[in-house]
Amino acid sequence: MSFDVWVQVPPLSHMKNRIKRDIQHRLNFVLFENDAIILKALFNNKILPLQLRIKARILLKNIPSITKIRNICVLTGRTRSIIRDYNLSRLSFRFAAENGYIAGIRRSTW
């Protein structure tokens, strides 16, 4: 009897799509980050004419936002309860720690 994996892994194709989508969101944000900063500065500048500020706001709406970026588990693609230092979900982290895959992590004892 073997207990290889305790983590319930989502279907492989779904996991790959989730990870691909997250990578695409991150790339889009990096590509448009400078443009978004410039357009926000133009929109918030009260000295500029109103027409220019409105145009900057309209262009700003079409830029991808950072709110689509989520922390995901690098093993399973899970988006909830991520431990940021390791980029693992709590389930993957527990499994890796119990099996000694993460150096220096032990179970707490009182």
Image (spheres, rainbow, N blue to C red):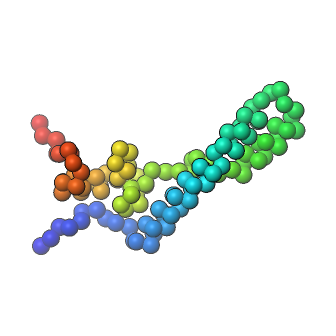
Tell me the quadrant of the picture where the N terminus can be found.
Answer: bottom left
Count the numbered circles shown.
0
In this picture, residue 107 sits left or right of residue 69 = left
- Residue depicted at 88% across the width and 38% down the height: 51
Look at 80% across and 27% down and name the residue there.
46
Instruction: Describe residue 93's horizontal placement relative to residue 72 as left or right.
Output: left
Does residue 81 appear in the picture of this structure? no
Q: Nearer the viewer, residue 33 or 55?
A: 33
Residue 35 position in % (x across, y down): 70, 44
Going 20% across and 44% down the picture, which residue do you hit? 104
- Percent x, y for residue 110? 11, 36
Location of residue 83 in the rendering, given as x and y in whole percent from the top left corner: 35, 46
79 or 102: which is nearer to us?
A: 102
Which residue is depicted at the point 78% across and 46% down?
58
**Residue 36 location (% of width, % of height):** 68, 43
Does residue 47 appear in the picture of this structure? yes
Taking 94 as reference, is 36 left or right? right
* Image vertical order of residue 37 relative to residue 27, above or below: above
Nearer the observer, 75 or 7: 75
